[in-house]
Image (spheres, grey):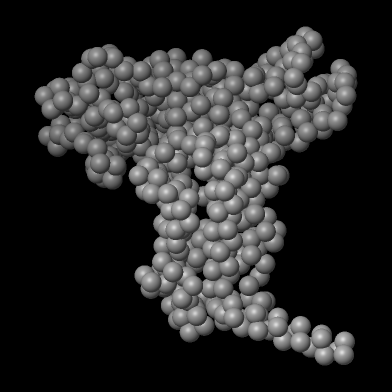
Amino acid sequence: MFESLSDKLKKTLKNLRGQGKLTPEHVDAALREIRMALLEADVNYKVAKDFVKAVRVKAEGQEVWNDLKPHEQVVKIVYDELVNLFGGTSSRLVFTKQVPNTVMIVGLQGSGKTTSTGKISKWLAENQERKPLLVSVDVYRPAAREQLKVVGDAVGQSVYTDPESDDPLTLVKGAQKHAQELGYDTLIIDTAGRLHIDDELMVELEQIKEETNPVEVLFVADAMTGQDAVRSAEEFHKRVGITGVVLTKMDGDARGGAALSIKQVIGQPVKFVGVGEKYDAIEPFYPDRIAQRILGMGDVLSLIEEVQSKVDEEEAKAQLEKITSNQFTLEDFRNQLRQFKQLGSMSKLMKMLPEQMLGGMSLSDEQSEEVEANLKRTEAMIDSMTIQERRDHSIINASRKTRIANGSGSTIAEVNGLLRQYEQMRKMMQQMNKGGMFGGIGKRMMSGMAGGLGNMLGGGGMPGGMFGGGQDLDNEPDETSASLAKRLKRKKKRKKRKKKR
């Protein structure tokens, strides 16, 4: 998300580097580019105009930070204004002691309300220790209530149904009573999709709101509709009074105009963004972290949270002990690959790291898919090994390599590449251990991780091409053992000695 805007802003700000002193002409040129970048990202015209004006006032107001260079000062100003544009601070859902707390999900037809209802309920259960009950009051769309039941089962959350009633208010009252009796502290109402000009259905929303007194009214919008989403949110806010916005399909929106405009236009923050089709592909909206991503500063906090939520802490500790005692086997390597895959695509993870740590390296979606395909192939090769081979790679001779290659649909050269890479990784871990890398957490660990990532993905930096960035193994000689390689070296040396004689 925001790829288009991010690329243009980073290019514009990069042009300011090297200027010992920023003149008004430099600032004017940069602001023109920033304004164009915002408009091309489908940001509301007035919002873009006000943003540029605010940056100009601060840039020309002689705000000086002694520890920042001139171009860094402009970057700091742009960052602060981006955070302000997004709403300043993250807005969590607010709950009271009332039981149940009601959350209304509203929006246009086809915006993703039902799926978002399931995603939000799963997120609340896992991250805010809530016990949600879902109910659909969409009595107009065929099988709408059955769809929510399917979604509820998929995310492991309860859904209230009443086959005897087709009245939204009756359904809501029944769900509230059911929640109170069974101890559900959160009732999430999936309302019928509607056009904002549909007065009858808007009146229905007002009645449901009056009946339930919700703590949150969340407007779900398709981010890819841009300013149409903003206009719709504005109309819903006038009629119902929304408290926040959920933007779906943000992973497919390279511009981000809706996210950049909504807070300034309607005065209500974006609270969640949908970043994929899976039910865990939803994130709280953090203005500061999004601004950091746009300007290439990374989002290490989100990366850490992602790791903490998807990587088993006890297993990670056990892996660290093996690494520090030099007992890291191919079996452990396979387990790490599996954990790594749970974190999402490689391109997504790299966007969370600051550009300085990656040395300007980036991955397109196609390259990311290639990396993931190579990871699967690597895992298949390790799966084709016996338990003894995974725990002691030194016993893997020529015949074993042939069997592993045949069993995983790979070549002997690729098996050689895997073993070579594994050996290099063990050596690197030994060096890190000697240097005290594993003794603390901080910049050294992060820079070490980024350095390792750079070696794996850089051109020619990954012998064996395991992650798609190394040399082509299919063009390497099919040497089937380390001993054969040593014999060839000795043979060459003998020939050289004979020639000298």
The number of discs equals: 0
Residue 435 seen by the camera: yes
Q: Could you tell me which quadrant the N terminus lies in?
A: top right
Above or below, 326 against 27 in this view is below
Is 399 situated left or right of 16 in this image?
left
Is 201 situated left or right of 431 in this image?
left
Q: Could you tell me which quadrant the C terminus lies in?
A: bottom right
260 and 138: which is toward the camera: 260
94 and 449: which is toward the camera: 449
381 and 388: which is toward the camera: 388
Residue 147 placement (x, y as % from top left) = 28, 43
Q: Residue at x 37, y 21 (%)?
A: 93
The outermost residue toward the top is: 61
Residue 226 placement (x, y as % from top left) = 56, 32
The outermost residue toward the front is: 501
Residue 380 placement (x, y as % from top left) = 45, 68
Q: Residue at x 79, y 23 (%)?
A: 69
Is 430 situated left or right of 320 in this image?
right
Location of residue 200 (image quadrant): top left
Residue 383 placement (x, y as % from top left) = 41, 69
270 and 412: which is toward the camera: 412
Q: Residue at x 59, y 52 (%)?
A: 431
Above or below, 93 against 447 in this view is above
Q: Residue at x 23, y 15 (%)?
A: 98
Location of residue 413 (image quadrant): bottom right
Residue 206 seen by the camera: no
